[in-house]
Image (cartoon, rainbow, N blue to C red):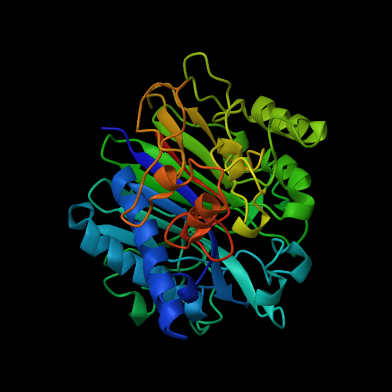
């Protein structure tokens, strides 16, 4: 069976997103947001779930995440295990991918969340222990540093592997000392930044699957102000540029902050063309462009207080005209081919289909009624659409995210 990958930028994912006990209202809203997240995951049934924009207290790049972001990630893992016990869910210990997140890199309307610039970002990669075995490529080292100071290191024999700190017990496979990779070099062994030291790095995780393949997953969240340069730097990464072996798959997925269509700026499409050409990443979908839904629909959502005053029944009402999230793949000669790539649109109302020319995959959770309540141009219809129990809990700011999830079978 194919391995299903789900990638979702969940805006500013931390404990407040899914467990906010500030007061009764925020507590209820966080419960609804958690229900929305779990509903989407449960209906997609992925074997790998990549959560982009995982928050952490700031610190040294390559160290384990800390603070409420860590608690939130483990809480979500706990919920996933209860929801899908047959999957045997685990979480690759997330690592800090930038020293801190500058205020000017925050999405509009969230500058206040940074406070004194006291947080950074990671990427959380959840995986099914029944379908996959995590194999690095880095390791957690046995050295004299504290758990707060240790960074994941290459598996080159210089360090012996070490178990993770005690709080990871039961959340990660026993006796597995592998870690994700947070630093990258080119074929000349020169260190690569994306494009600067202060910007977020990709997160490289490696798996054996139940078909005997090796899946090399590069999850990415570029910084908006330097996304072009970051995408160009991906072309230099040694592990990507050398291509897959016969039984390997290379997957580059996440929030590129770059639209491959060039609909906003034609230069954006040129950077994506360079990535696609240099790496020869191919999805091989019938009659489809190389990149996921390149000519398709948006992957981002509009804040509810920016929605227009009319046109509530139209699809453009809640979506921006931009495709910032994407998945690219390259397969070894014996590794198969991708299928069933979809954008997870929770509002539009289209059921799952394997037809690549169909509308995006849509999931409704138990709270969502926006499809039926947004078919009128009256002010009452707009009010119902904006309500937290409808679009309000899905979209940005008060809801789950300003991005829609992607799914693909690899």
Closest to the observer, 245 or 101: 101
**Toward which corner of the image does residue 35 lie, by quadrant?**
bottom left
Query: Residue at the spot x=44%, y=31% of the render?
Result: 341
Q: In the rendered view, tell whether residue 99 sits above or below residue 276.
A: below
Query: Residue at the spot x=51%, y=78% of the render?
Result: 66
Q: In the rendered view, tell whether residue 93 sits above or below residue 126.
A: below
Horizontal and vertical percent for residue 50?
45, 52
Q: Which quadrant does the N terminus fall into?
A: top left
**Toward which corner of the image does residue 279 lie, by quadrant?**
top right
Q: Which quadrant does the C terminus fall into?
A: top left
Horizontal and vertical percent for residue 385?
50, 52
Q: Is residue 400 visible?
A: no
Closest to the observer, 348 or 290: 348
Horizontal and vertical percent for residue 351?
35, 33
Horizontal and vertical percent for residue 80?
29, 61
Query: Residue at the spot x=50%, y=85% of the render?
Result: 146
- Number of marks: 0
Residue projecting furthest to the top: 287
Q: In the rendered view, tell whether residue 157 sits above or below residue 220.
A: below
Q: Can residue 402 be seen in this view?
A: yes
Closest to the observer, 234 or 351: 351
Closest to the observer, 167 or 55: 55
């Amino acid at each position: 069976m194919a391995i299903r990958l789900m990638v979702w930028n969940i805006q500013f994912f931390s404990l407040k997103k899914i467990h906010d006990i500030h007061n009764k209202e925020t507590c209820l809203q966080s419960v609804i947001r958690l229900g929305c997240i779990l509903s989407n995951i449960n209906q997609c049934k992925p074997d790998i779930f990549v959560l982009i924009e995982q928050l952490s207290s700031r610190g040294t790049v390559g160290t384990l995440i800390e603070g409420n972001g860590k608690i939130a990630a483990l809480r979500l893992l706990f919920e996933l295990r209860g929801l899908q016990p047959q999957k045997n869910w685990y979480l690759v210990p997330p690592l800090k991918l930038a020293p801190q997140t500058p205020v000017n890199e925050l999405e509009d309307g969230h500058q206040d969340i940074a406070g004194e610039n006291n947080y950074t970002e990671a990427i959380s990669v959840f995986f099914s222990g029944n379908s996959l075995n995590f194999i690095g490529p880095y390791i957690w080292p046995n050295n004299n540093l504290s758990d707060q100071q240790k960074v994941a290191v290459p598996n080159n024999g210089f360090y012996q592997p070490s178990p993770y700190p005690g709080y990871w017990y039961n959340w990660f496979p026993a006796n597995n000392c592998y870690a994700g990779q947070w630093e990258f070099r080119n074929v000349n062994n020169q260190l690569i930044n994306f494009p600067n030291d202060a910007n977020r790095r990709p997160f490289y995780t490696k798996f054996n699957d139940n078909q005997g393949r090796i899946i090399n997953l590069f999850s990415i969240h570029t910084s908006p102000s330097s996304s072009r340069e970051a995408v160009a730097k991906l072309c230099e990464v040694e592990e990507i540029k050398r291509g897959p072996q016969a039984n390997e798959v290379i997957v580059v997925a996440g929030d590129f902050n770059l639209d491959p269509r060039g609909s906003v700026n034609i230069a954006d499409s040129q950077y994506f063309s360079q990535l696609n050409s240099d790496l020869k990443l191919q999805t091989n979908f019938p009659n489809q462009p190389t990149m996921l839904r390149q000519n398709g629909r948006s992957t981002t959502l509009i804040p509810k207080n920016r929605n227009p005053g009319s046109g509530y029944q139209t699809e453009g009402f809640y979506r921006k005209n931009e495709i910032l999230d994407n998945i690219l793949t390259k397969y070894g000669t014996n590794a198969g081919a991708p299928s069933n790539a979809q954008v997870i649109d929770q509002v539009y109302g289209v059921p799952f289909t394997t037809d690549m020319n169909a509308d995006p995959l849509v999931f409704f959770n138990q709270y969502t009624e926006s499809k039926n309540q947004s078919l009128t141009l009256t002010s009452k219809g707009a009010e119902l659409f904006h309500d937290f129990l409808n679009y309000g809990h899905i979209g940005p700011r008060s809801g789950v995210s300003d991005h829609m999830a992607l799914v693909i079978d690899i």
